[in-house]
Image (tube, rainbow, N blue to C red):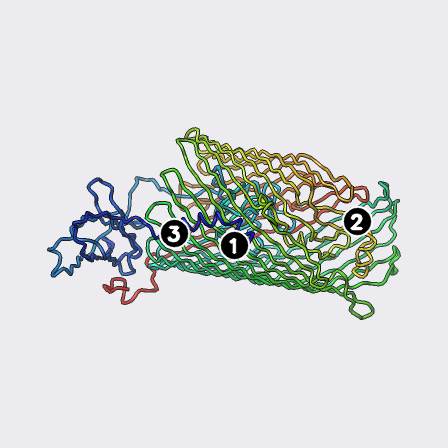
Amino acid sequence: MKFLLLLGLGLQAGIYSFAQVDREPPAVEEPAEIQLQKQRVFGKLVDEATGKNLDAVSVRLYVIRDNGSDSLVTGMLTRPNGDFSFSGIKKDLRYRLVFSAIGYEPFEKELQIGDEDGVSGSIEKDLGNIDLNTAIKQLNNVTVVASRPLLEMGIDRKVFNVEKSLTSSGGTAVDVMKNIPSVSVDIDGNVELRNSSPQIFIDGRPTILTLDQIPADNIEKVELITNPSAKFDAASSGGIINIVLKKNKRVGLNGMASVNAGTPRVFGSNLNLNLRQGKLNFFASGGYSQSRGKAKGETLRQNKENGTIKDYFNQLSENERSRRFTSLRFGVDYFIDNRNTITVSQRYFNGKFGNDEVQDQEYLDVNKVMQYYGKRLSGSESHYRRNSSNLNYTHKFPQEGRELSADINYNKGNHSNVSGITNAFYFPDGTSYEPVSVVNSSSSSKNDQVTFRIDYTNPIKENAKIETGIRVYYNDFSSIYNAFADENGQQVKLPLSNNYEYQEKVNAAYFTFTNKISDFGYQLGLRAEYSKFDGQLVDSAYKFGYEYPKKIAKIWDALFPSIFLSRKINEEDELQLNYSRRIRRPDFWQLNPFIDINDPVNLRQGNPDLKPEYINMFELNYSKKIGNSNLLSTLYLRNNPKDITQYSDTITTEQYQQLDNAAVDPNAILNTYINASNKNTFGAEFVFQYKLAKDFDITPSVDLQYRKVKARVKNINLDNKGFNFESKLIANYKITAKQESSLFNRLGFQLTGNYESPTVIPQGRRDAQYSVDLAMRKEFLKNNKGSLTFAVNDVFNTDRYGVTYDTESFYQDSYRRRNVRNFRITFSYKFGDANFSILRRGGGNDNHDD
């Protein structure tokens, strides 16, 4: 009931707008005296040079009006045999047929049906074969090549074209993200945009895939929106990163195949196919990928008592990670007619990940004399299965820009894991310090996610439009984790075992109005969202969660306005000011009370009492074109009441007793999450695309931030503040030799460098991160269909994630690595045949309807 009250206005606006579908004004206004007699006109389109029937040519039928305002009656795409046909046209009216197809000159033909075209009122007019001329323009000694740049910058979004990213070739979406300005990737593969967590979409829809499960060769482009409007999910507090997968609609068969190999034990292959046949467009892709690598880590800690050091602890680790996964995606677009399209798609993913880690531990007294040492061996193996189904319908009205779309998306996945940990401790002389401890664990989880949405766009004037829609989201998740200690051959269940499940619901409606007056544009939007989270620890019946708004008096908790103002100063300068209110809901790992003991001195646990945080986001953007270059400058402010942030403390005596058999350190640090009082982030970002020469460009970027955090836990003041920055440089150079046969002709180079300065957190700082990637690509074969790419990720093997904590009870400096330097060679081949047909019968020139 609360949701109905909340959503009423949005639904009413949406339903009213959708109802207008059946109220289309007639395309032709006829005088009353005209006798309405039905007729039919038909014909066939052929290539003038080859005589081949032309498939999927756009044919539009207009009525010619005396006032010059011709009216569109209908349209269609020609059949595979080139036929087109229109019925329901009227006698004595003048018509105009417009033919258009990629690769052909546009052509128009006028006609008028009279009594002489038929007998006894049953009239059919055959226009015969209509020839279209190939669109070929000869330029003297000039080759025109249309090519998108690596990064396209707009005042409201950035578009990263992955095909131009040499360093990510043969890698995953994680490698792609490392190349995008303002985006960084942490040790666990999580993406941050301006030090905030963005919402990840695939083709504009939610996903349960992680970034390292998406092959880079399947990605066409990545769209980056730093401050989304009310049209987008309110949960996109950190911005939106939309991964657009490859799919084209060119006639015939098109595709690309690639294979890559490298070290350490890197191998992958990928195939993308697209077949456009008449009203159907089939697309499919599949791939296999594997990688391995040994990554090192280090922890150096001082334990304190009343602020004074009492002992030391050192730990060195080496983790061998293996990754292996397969993916499959296929679907079809069905073009019912020129205005209606249905798309059905399906994705499957299967992955197997493994970790084998060795940890060497040293326990020292206050004088740094070793008291005892330990060796910890751990191994785990995980299996993932994911699938995603999507159904989409799009209707385009005769009025340009007016569109209705409906979409339903279903994600399903499961995960299983088994692991074992062995811990042994010894005195300096090698004798046993305490009995060897063994912990075995197993876990499984499943996830079902459904999203349904309807979007409607209506340009009510030349420069004005309204957009409205509804969205329903449901997520059902369950997880079971069991841990056992081996005591004299007996398996004893540990208290850290848990059975956890939750259901999450988000129902939303939005409305935006966009208008432009001269050079001034504005957009006003409002989004309403009702969200509910119900979590439960099944074994203990402990329940937790949230509901917003819980009562009508808290309606502001469900409203998310946005305001965008823009001014085009001239052709080179544009200014935009925007504001939006967003929400950040805690994710599974931040809520799950399960304690992760993989690192015995750095434990991790979620906090089921976490509440969502609300964010007020302000941006001022200035875009300036300087010749062939472009500068985008941004000033921004993020105000985060109840900011979700990390908090660390040594485990309590009670917690240690519960975990005693799990072989954790008595002074282990427990890392969890809390709601801080607030956080303010002031930032300035500059991205400059500079074209030094025809084939040489650089894109330097820098993001400057000042962060101020206020937080208090157990009467402990955790306030902190500080300045940090992130800089990135992308350089591209391509050799264009005078001689086409030169070995160096079409040889491209790409360099990407990244540096992130130390960043303040409530109890310390994240350490600096830096890395350099390098790649070169040689294009060859006819029409550059083949390419060979050599890439080195993390050239100097410096990319690692470090954190320093400084509290009353401990000081700790630690780092971990996710990946190690790797080398990859990728061969790619593009292919296509515009004349390919699986529907061909009796040759390409049959004269029968298909």
Do the CB atoms of the residues marked 1 and 2 lie less than 8 Å apart?
Answer: no
* Residue 31 locus on image (x, y percent): 19, 47
Q: Amino acid at mark 3?
A: Ala
Residue at the spot of label 1: 472
Q: Earlier in the sequence, mark 1 or mark 3?
A: 3
Q: Amino acid at mark 2?
A: Thr
Mark 1 closeness class: few <14, some 14–19, many ≥20 residues within 10 Å: some
* Residue 253 locus on image (x, y percent): 38, 58
Q: Earlier in the sequence, mark 1 or mark 2?
A: 1
Q: Nearer the viewer, mark 1 or mark 2?
A: 1
Left or right relative to 362: residue 586: left
Q: Quick one: quadrant of the C terminus?
A: bottom left
Residue at the spot of label 3: 19
Instruction: Determine whether 483 is above or below 62 in the image.
Output: below
Near-viewer residue (714 or 340): 714
Give the SS element for disc 1: strand
Q: Amino acid at mark 1?
A: Val
Q: Is residue 172 visible?
A: no
Query: Outermost residue, top direction?
Result: 569
| Quarter residue 291 falls in | bottom right
* Residue 708 locus on image (x, y percent): 68, 36
Left or right relative to 236: residue 611: right
* Residue 199 locus on image (x, y percent): 56, 48
Residue at the spot of label 2: 650
